Image: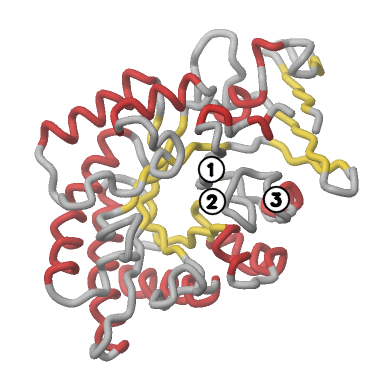
């Protein structure tokens, strides 16, 4: 896999160099730092073109890829507050998180301040944050459609999560729908979900963020009702119709959709316009790109052609060598 960087400077000169020719401007910085103002690194106005090679040796490319690191799967060998700095050391200045405090939908100000400080000290921007979703990782897949205590905890979390997101410039808040509950009418759960999602959409709007609705996959989440893109986008449309805000979007996770057997190019073609965030991992195994069989370069290229220019979350399991060693696919 080769990397070709095309950088245009202020005078319009264009220079093409490989990462080997200019090691100070490697792929992680160029791809993951489009918002950086650090000297010597490409800014958001520079263009990065990366060549990927699939198993047949054919070259695929896409421009202006913006990768962020999911700190709830990567760098989890470190304490939470050390992960932003580890991501920065690996070359990224954008990260995302599941709700970090599984048992605390409303953590105290000190905890929130410490996380904010860790992000700021590392120079990392939080670009995606989950609302409270129960025990995740674990048996839960969200709380907002679960009657009783869990939906109450979600509601208590909504304003806390939104205000924290606003304080760090995070503009995407993901609301996992929640599992079906035995003995509860699905229609009752869906009505509760819509009520809570409307509240979340308004809170997101207050901080200029979008609300994300994610489809998971049935093999790993058999009680989760949104296991295909159409089901998730239907919820997106219903929330937007009720609020009139048009700030609810689809979270397109290529790994989950592939686990469900989706026609991924068709999903991209049909739903790219309603997509607010993308996450990737290879399949099988949920590892880094290149560890499985998904044609991720082609799929991200299709997203680019469909005018998606948002963040691409690296939400995969690190290799046995550790998280820092899991980004070789970016420079190999």
For label 1, count other residues whose C-alpha is less than 10 Å away and answer few (under 14), some (14-19) or many (20+).
many
State the residue position of label 1. 314
Label number found at residue 163: none
Q: Secondary structure at mark 1?
A: strand
Here the colouring is: secondary structure
Q: CA distance from mark 2 to mark 1?
A: 6 Å
Q: Secondary structure at mark 3?
A: helix
Residue 252 rendering spot, x and y as whole percentages: 54, 59
Q: Which comes before the other along the chain, label 3 or label 2?
A: 2
For label 3, count other residues whose C-alpha is less than 10 Å away and answer few (under 14), some (14-19) or many (20+).
many
Q: CA distance from mark 3 to mark 1?
A: 12 Å
Q: Is residue 98 above or below residue 115?
A: below
For label 2, count other residues whose C-alpha is less than 10 Å away and answer few (under 14), some (14-19) or many (20+).
many
Q: Which comes before the other along the chain, label 2 or label 1?
A: 2
**Considering depth in this image, is 165 or 111 the residue closer to the camera?**
111
Residue 90 rendering spot, x and y as whole percentages: 52, 23
Q: Dots 2 and 1: beta carbons under 8 Å?
A: yes
Residue at 30% of width from left, 33% of height from top? 80
Residue 47: quadrant of the picture: top right
Residue at 24% of width from left, 55% of height from top? 203
Is residue 320 toward the left or the right of residue 209 in the image?
A: right
State the residue position of label 3. 296
Residue 137: quadrant of the picture: bottom left
- Where, quadrant-wise, is the C terminus in this rendering? top right
**Considering depth in this image, is 9 or 28 the residue closer to the camera?**
28
**Considering depth in this image, is 101 or 79 the residue closer to the camera?**
79
**Considering depth in this image, is 120 or 75 the residue closer to the camera?**
75
Q: CA distance from mark 3 to mark 2?
A: 11 Å
Q: Secondary structure at mark 2?
A: strand
Residue at 54% of width from left, 52% of height from top? 278
Residue 172 rendering spot, x and y as whole percentages: 39, 48
Label number found at residue 279: 2
């Amino acid at each position: 896999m080769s990397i070709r960087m095309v950088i245009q400077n202020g005078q319009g000169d264009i220079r093409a160099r490989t990462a080997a020719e200019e090691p100070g401007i490697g792929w992680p910085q160029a791809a993951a730092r489009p918002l950086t103002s650090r000297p010597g690194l490409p800014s958001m106005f520079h263009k990065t073109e990366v060549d990927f090679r699939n198993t047949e040796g054919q070259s695929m490319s896409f421009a202006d890829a913006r990768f962020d690191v999911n700190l709830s799967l990567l760098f989890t060998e470190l304490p939470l507050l050390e992960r932003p700095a580890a991501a920065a050391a690996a070359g990224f200045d954008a990260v995302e998180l599941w709700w970090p405090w599984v048992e605390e939908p409303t953590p105290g100000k000190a905890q929130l301040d410490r996380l904010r400080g860790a992000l700021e000290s590392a120079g990392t921007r939080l670009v995606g944050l989950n609302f409270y979703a129960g025990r995740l990782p674990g048996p839960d897949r969200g709380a907002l459609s679960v009657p009783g205590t869990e939906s109450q905890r979600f509601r208590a979390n909504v304003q806390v999560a939104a205000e924290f997101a606003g304080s760090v410039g995070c503009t995407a808040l993901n609301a996992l729908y929640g599992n079906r509950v035995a003995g509860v009418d699905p229609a009752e759960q869906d009505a509760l979900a819509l009520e809570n999602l409307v509240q979340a959409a308004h809170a997101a709007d207050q901080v200029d963020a979008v609300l994300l609705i994610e489809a998971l996959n049935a093999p790993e989440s058999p009680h989760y009702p949104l296991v295909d893109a159409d089901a998730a986008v239907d919820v997106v449309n219903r929330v937007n119709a009720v609020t009139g805000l048009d700030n609810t979007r689809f979270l397109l996770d290529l790994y989950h959709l592939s686990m469900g057997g989706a026609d991924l190019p068709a999903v991209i073609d049909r739903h790219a316009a309603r997509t607010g965030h993308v996450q990737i991992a290879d399949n099988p195994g949920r590892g880094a790109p290149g560890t499985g069989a998904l044609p991720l370069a082609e799929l991200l290229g299709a997203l680019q052609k469909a005018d998606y220019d948002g963040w691409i979350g690296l939400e995969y399991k690190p290799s046995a060598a550790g998280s820092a060693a899991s980004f070789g696919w970016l420079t190999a």
